[in-house]
Amino acid sequence: MPPATLVELVNGWGTTPRAARKDDGGEDTYLTTAELLDRLGAPSSVSRVLTDHALTAVADRLHPVFATADATEQARLITGLLDDTRVRPVLNVMAGHPHAGWIVDNAEDAVLASAAVTLRRYLAERGPGRLGVCTGRRCTDVYVDASPGGRRRFCSVTCQNRARVAAFRSRRASAGH
């Protein structure tokens, strides 16, 4: 699962991000179930079990991984997801070349397992501090920090700009203008 699709899943179906958008008067402009399945290339055995309710449950299991800044806790949560889904590594041959893959026993666990494998690989390669929840006011959307410096704090440019405008107005008000 590409990290960007993982973020779309958590932000689009997660109870916490959706509630924050609703409270803020925002709209749900994330991928539809069909669009997500298309991006994932999910086989029909997986597509049949992925209702909006199932996607919400997956997103809600993933949100805490982004919400903690503690590397040990992130590792514990991701390891728990891998254990719960019973994901197993396999080696497939595609076009005559070995290809690393994984399998699960239940189709219902495929998206959660895919997300857990993605998070495991991403954190192992990039290190802690690369996942987070937006620090924008009233925003609980998550992000994956792929920046070279690893200093991302906002889910989008929109939230970053809102924070900058609010800080500017606050400084201006403090200066008595």
Image (tube, rainbow, N blue to C red):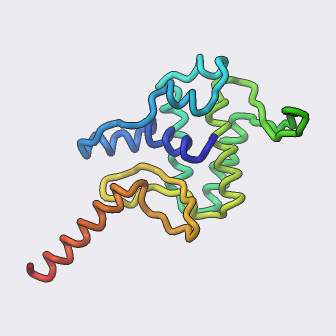
Q: Where is residue 60 in the image (x, y as percent from the top left)?
A: 50, 39
The residue under the point 39% across, 44% down is: 17
> Furthest residue to the right?
96
Q: Residue 173 vs residue 85: left or right?
A: left
Q: Can residue 53 be seen?
A: no
The residue under the point 33% across, 55% down is: 158
Instruction: Give whichever of 98, 121 is nearer the camera.
Output: 98
> Furthest residue to the bottom?
175
Quadrant of the image containing the C terminus: bottom left
Q: Quadrant of residue 98?
A: top right
The residue under the point 25% across, 71% down is: 167
Q: Where is residue 45 in the image (x, y as percent from the top left)?
A: 67, 18
Q: Residue 139 vs residue 172: left or right?
A: right
Q: In this view, does 68 lie above or below 91?
A: below
Q: Quadrant of residue 72?
A: bottom right
Q: Is residue 80 above or below residue 154?
A: above
The residue under the point 44% across, 38% down is: 12
Q: In this view, does 89 lie above or below 68?
A: above
Q: In which quarter of the image is residue 6?
A: top right
